[in-house]
Image (cartoon, rainbow, N blue to C red):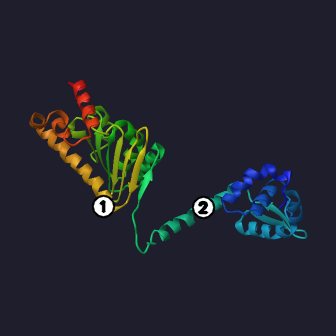
Amino acid sequence: MKSSSTRSPLAKQAARLQALGLTAYEAVAYLILLQHHPATAYEIGKLGGLVKANVYPTLESLVRRGAVQPVSREPTRYVPVDPQSFLSSVAQGTATLCNELVAELGEVTPDDPVEYVWLLQSAADIQARIAQMIAQARKHIWLKGPENLLLPHRTALREAVKRGTKLVVILFGNESAAKRFRFSQNARVYLHEGSGMIVGAGESQVIVACDFGQALSANIAEHCEGAFTRNPSVVYLAESLIRHEIYLAEIISAYAPRIEADFGKALVSLRRHYLPERYVEDLRARLAVRL
């Protein structure tokens, strides 16, 4: 194929057609025919700057693909199939092939399967992975995080609950925020430790666990970092953490006065022994504001 200015306006469309599986010659020949038809192989080759010996095999291939049709003989002239019909056929065929491959490749297992921990290093990547997990979940979705980081997923969470997925949220926020996620009886929302107060890295930390099969933990702060995995041991850790958050929220709800008397508001007298000092000071500041 010649490099000439005559086909430069076709370059963008030709590149897109090649992305759909056409060869460079097929893409140019099809585009030439859209503008000039009916046309012979000689005319197509001349207009497209195509090497003559390659034009006939190219047109035969396009006929097999359902992109062009011959309409006369001696000489044979060709016309294009309209783009709507041709590309709809390509889309349907591609979708069918992809669905078949998904089923077939899903049965392929490595000799020594390993479940990796995938690192996520931007807020966009983290939120995209959370969205994917929500879309794939069928049994349950367990979440822990602050209201502002969970709100972008509110619509997807509602749809998940509608399809029968059970939702549990441990929320850093207030009761008004909690109501935004209580879509039905299948959506249970607990304020963190009964109050929803930010503790430790709670204002930027998100934990997600789905279907006993995948988990994500991320810190969406100035320097984002996160990890996603299907490793059973790590998934178990994430789900255990959220389960115990549920237990603690229920216990505090039932015995708040006694617990507060023994351990202080937000368990501060207990936490001061185990949290990093910066988080202890932050908690004391938050408690002072509330007092």
- State the quadrant of the N terminus: bottom right
Judging depth in this view, the residue of 227 and 52 nearest the camera is 227
Identify which amino acid the numbered label 1 is placed on: Ser
User: Pointer 1: residues within 10 angstroms few (<14), some, or many (20+)?
Assistant: few
Between marks 1 and 2, how big is the CA–CA gap? 40 Å
Please give left or right for residue 74 compared with residue 284 in the image.
Answer: right
Q: Nearer the viewer, mark 1 or mark 2?
A: 1
**Image quarter (top left, top right, bottom left or bottom right) of the C terminus:** top left
> Which of 241/62 is in front?
241
Task: Locate residue 228: give its quadrant.
Answer: bottom left
| Residue sticking out furthest to the bottom | 111
The kind of secondary structure element at disc 1 is: helix
Residue at image position (75%, 61%) is: 24
| Residue 260 placement (x, y as % from top left) | 13, 35
Label at residue 92 = 2
Cβ atoms under marks 1 and 2 closer than 8 Å: no
Left or right of 47? Residue 207 is left
* Closer-to-camera residue (84/219): 219
In primary-sequence order, the first of circles 1 and 2 is 2
| Residue ID for mark 1 | 233
Q: Is residue 25 above or below residue 152?
A: below
Label 2 element class? helix
Residue appearing at x 29%, y 37% in the figure: 172
Q: Amino acid at mark 2?
A: Gln
Q: Which mark is residue 108?
A: none
Task: Residue at 33%, 53% (x, y): give it.
Answer: 209
Residue 137 point in image, percent of width and height: 37, 55
Query: Where's residue 251, x and y in %?
Result: 15, 43
How dense is the environment of label 2, judged by Cα within 10 Å: few (below 14), some, or many (20 and up)? Answer: few
